[in-house]
Amino acid sequence: MPSEMRYTRPLSVHAFMRAYLCRGVNYMALTLFDKVWLQHVVRENDDGSVLLYIDRHLVHEVTSPQAFEGLRLAGRKPWRPSAAIATPDHNVPTIEREKGIADPVSRVQVEALDKNCREFGIAEFGMHDPRQGIVHVVGPEQGLTLPGMTVVCGDSHTSTHGALGAIAMGIGTSEVEHVLATQCLIMKKPKCMRIRVEGPLPRGVTGKDIALFIIGRIGTAGGTGHAIEFDGDTVHALSMEGRMSLCNMAIEAGARCGMVSVDQTTIDYVRGKPFAPKGEMWEQAVTAWRALHSDDAAVFDREWVFYSEEIEPQVTWGTSPEMVAPVTGRVPLISEARDAVQADSWRRALDYMALKEGTPIREIAIDKVFIGSCTNARIEDLRSAAEIVRGHRVASTVKQALVVPGSGLVKQQAEQEGLDRIFVEAGFEWRDPGCSMCLAMNADRLEPGERCASTSNRNFEGRQGMGGRTHLVSPAMAAAAAIAGHFVDVRDWQGEA
Amino acid sequence: MEAFTTLDGLVVPLDRANVDTDAIIPKQFLKSIKRTGYGPYLFDEWRYADRGEPGMDCSKRPLREDFVLNQERYKGASILLAGENFGCGSSREHAPWALLDYGFRCIIAPSFADIFYNNCFKNGILPIVLDADAVRRLMDECESTPGYRLRIDLPEQLVITPSGETFHFEIDDFRKHCLIHGLDDIALTLEHADEIRAYEKEQRARMPWLFIDVSG
Ligand code: SF4
């Protein structure tokens, strides 16, 4: 059955299917997205949109103040405050936090979040709470994000949480208010796309490299209007951290969200997390979660298949995540562009990045290194970077190398493992958790003209500071670049000086 | 959202075309975390002789006496008469927030920018399109008549002048319904509150782990 036909069913059928799905009996082939979606349809509106129930609402300081204000003005209360949880991340300082926030605008936003959470009865991991961190690191780490949930946050990289088999979407401030007030979102069902990556996971290749590789192939608009399911052996060979990096960047491919179906890795990851179900409820949940995969006969609106043998460690060279090359490659020649429009955008990107066409990636020297962000600041990311760094020193030509853990708990864990000492001894700065140089909203930023190897997700002009130049890479690649002073292939890493 | 049925209000004429959102509320005020409190900065550059910054105490700022909003006779106006293409520029909702916070509930103009027009309804402001001649006449009457008031009757879709002259205006039925009943998106969703509750009850029984309380 073509998948479009499923979009316009009346409410009764939704309810009927929900009932069936819950007993684990599917009378028709469904995609992973369909299954989670159908379980959350409260009602279907006349225009084909639905009222979608939201299980988890994550809140941070930048996109929430006007939403809370809206509630206050209308005299409304949150529908289910116990479904929401907040943490400040974008504006928090990553050093000398005990002194508070120097920038008044940032301070006001963080203080407003504290106040709003108190007033509306929403739990918050405040700036000084050991559980504070980037909201997309905190959610899965705390078991706030569970398989089969609908998760929203006023932030585009909410797609990260799809790694657990959840529908996780970024929303705007007016929608934040809508979810706070009603626990629902008015939405039209997006189309479904499956991207399969098949073959064993190559050495030195991470979820980040797979994400960049895919975006390089399908483009930053490749996923527009779609929910993407990442599937195939290679994807399922990734750890949860790797899957989160991959889903995190689904948004950079233009998709509404990214998802990975539930397997044993997912279940092992969720087990024992603070807010995960326990005891009998755990068993019941696991049974339901095991059905969270696309049925064999499910029909997608679009499908892609890639083979892992093609994927090498990736480095972006331009000002869009699709401007990417393998580390063994080079910056393209303008003459290789597919048309005049692309040639023009390449020319502008190379100009901004101060790179010549044809430059081998490994000859690009860097000024700064940023290991952090909701893409790559989990414990596994820090471990893989530390492994490269151990026993080496940051190159003398590198002005600053930052490691910003994704959350207070990641930081604690890393310190228990002694990773902080490895970084500090090598000349990295070991910081407190937050978004930091991913978007330079706090004091961490690039100066004009500085070139950075960054594990974040956006290399747009000025993203990491006005005039700053960003190359997106995996944590291991960033670490190796910090030591070498230029990009190197981690697969050959012996620790060149 | 406050409901809008009829309004009897003092009118202020702003005789300019293409008033953009940056003129309505300049960009330095967008860093605020609030959606109220923009009223004192409405039309900031036209109202004050100095450059406005967020947080300034506007009662102490030098006024541009020639700007209409500063004239004593228009104090307390709730209806704004404006030129064509009112509200052009960005999609920022700060523009209607500022107008509302100042006290405007109705804007009458020959035309409006699309997004601004939509944003007005979301915030309980009634934008009325009348033809350019009618707006011109109202402006003239308003300027020559101190204390000039208009009566707006949304159910009847009428603008009524002090002399009893009426102007009919068009409005989309759905929007009219929402304004009259004070319904915003949230209010519309809340009309289905029972369905949401029923859904929750069913879902909670079936998948209790989705309802683990995280506020503790
Ligand atoms: S780390 Fe970067 S991308 Fe992620 S939430 Fe923070 S600012 Fe956004």
Image (tube, coloured by chain):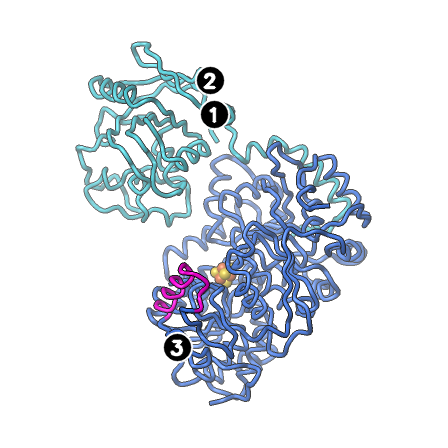
Q: Tell me if residue B187 comes above or below residue B200 in the rendering.
A: above
Q: Nearer the viewer, residue A331 or A211?
A: A331
Q: Tell me if residue A314 comes above or below residue A217 in the rendering.
A: below
Chain letter, blue: A
Q: CA distance from mark 3 to mark 1?
A: 58 Å
Magenta part, dominant SS: helix
Picture disc at residue A143:
none
- Chain on which label 2 sits: B
Picture disc at residue A367:
3
- Where does the image place residue B98, in percent across and percent down from the top left? 36, 37
**Camera-side mark, 3 or 1:** 1
- Write the residue at 56% across / 69% down: A208
Chain letter, cyan: B
Please name the residue that numbered disc 2 is placed on.
B155
Q: Tell me if residue A48 comes above or below residue A106 in the rendering.
A: above
- Where does the image place residue B200, in percent across and percent down from the top left? 70, 41
- Chain on which label 3 sits: A
